[in-house]
Every structure is written in structure tokens, then in C-alpha cells.
Image (tube, rainbow, N blue to C red):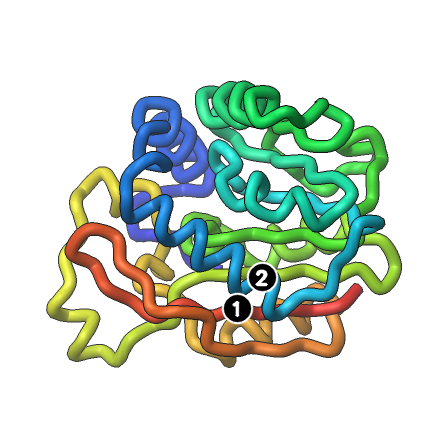
Amino acid sequence: MSHHAGHGSEDLVSNNKEYFDKHVHVYDTPDAIRMAEQQALAIRAACKFDKETTVLDFAGGHGQIARDLIRDVKSIVGVDISEEAIKKYNELSIAAGYSPDVLKGICKELKGEEGELGGAKFDLVICCMAYHHFPDCNEMTRILKSHLKPNGGLCVIDKLKPEAKEADSVSFPEDVKKMTTLHLFGFVEEEIRAIFEQAGLKDISFDFGFDGQWGEHKFKAFIAKGIN
């Protein structure tokens, strides 16, 4: 997959880490809090889980969605490349009364290597509003699939790409452009289905998730699922 013009994959990872280390407070804004609630509701509606379900919360920031879902699952491991986000993830998890064996964050760049995350496999992997930051969505989907148990599910939430004329009317700050790819505006269904299929996921579904807003930027979000 092509990346954003002028930014290689290493630059993109570095730019994202730098941004969220400096701006971890963005997760506490009213827009972020509202959107985390919307995403948790969408996941509950779309995914089957219970008190025996283990979850990998990938690119989960400081864990707003995880803290919403944790009461209904067995455990959640959050992974993010931002040290500051993960520091807050763990502080807030402990403050909410959860032990690390139930809810914890790990600062790590996943590469799909053998024994990664202690060899843990999960019933459900969630990745919310992060795919448009990835330099190679095919590779990242392969990596996330490698952390699924047999018949485990990958659940992705991101922006639904608008019509061209609608996209032309939207502008983004330069620091946001520096940490996103050509998918800055999101994805169409065919793109996500192709990415999931290439990773070998089956029983793929793609549905409308919710109407989102971040600052002045309004968008429609999708929720996509695939089974290992």
C-alpha cells in the first residue's frame, strides 16, 4: 500500500509516536470521550463476547474503550506505540480497580514475530480509528491476525471514505497529515474487504457504525469484522 506522499513507514510510526506522546490529553477531549462511547457501543452490537473472552486492544490510546468493555470480558491487553498513552492506560486501569492480569497496557510496536506478547493469542482483536495511520494495512492486518486464536475475530472501526467533492471541502492540520497515510479520509468497503481477504480472514462483514465528529471534521464510521 502506498503511504502519504513524502513519508516512509518509519517516519510515519515516529510521527505518530511523537504526536501522541506530546498530545496524550487529546483522549480526554469531549469529542474523544463521545467517540470512545460510540465505538464501544458499536463493538458491543457487532461482536460476540462474554466473561471468558480475551481481548487485544491495538492502538488503544490510553484505554477509554477498554475500560468501557472490560466489565463484559475476561481480560484486555492494550498495545500502543506511545509511552505516554500506555503510562496513562495503566494508571487509569489501576485507579478503576483493575489488576494488570485483567486490564493492562504495553508499549510496543507489533511485528507479528513468534513469541510476541509472550505468545498470547486472543479471542478478539479490536483496532479503532487507527487503520488510517498505518503505512501498510495489509501487513498490519496480517500481524493482528497472527495474535488471534483459531476462530477468533478481528474488529476494525475507522472512517468511511466520503465522496470526492465532500472530501475536497475538508482540510487537516499539517501535524495530522504527517501521521496519516493516503487513507486520511478513510476507506471504502472494497478496500477493507480486500485487506481482510489478503490476510486470510473469513466471514467478513462491513457495516455502518456511527456518525462521528472530531473538531470541525464530521464523518461516518464503519465497523468491519473478519474471522481467523
* Residue that mark 1 sits on: 223
- Is residue 221 positioned above or below 22 on the image? below
Query: Label 2, label 1: how many angstroms apart (C-alpha)?
Result: 8 Å
**Closest to the observer: 146 or 124?**
124
Is there CB contact under 8 Å for labels 2 and 1?
Answer: yes
The label shown at residue 43 is 2
In front: 165, or 154? Answer: 154
Q: Which amino acid does the dot numbered 2 rest on?
A: Ile
Residue 160 image-quadrant placement: bottom left
Q: Considering only vertical position in the picture, is 199 above or below 86?
A: below
Q: Nearer the viewer, mark 2 or mark 1?
A: 2
Q: Earlier in the sequence, mark 2 or mark 1?
A: 2
Q: On the rendered image, what quadrant is the C terminus found in?
A: bottom right
Kindly identify the residue that appears in the image at 18 percent across and 75 percent down: 166
**Secondary structure under the numbered disc 1 in the rendered image:** strand
Amino acid type for the residue under numbered disc 1:
Ile
Give the left or right position of residue 226, taking residue 134 as reference.
Answer: right
x, y percent for residue 193: 58, 76
Residue found 46% across the figure and 76% down from its top: 208
Q: Is residue 84 left or right of residue 141?
A: left
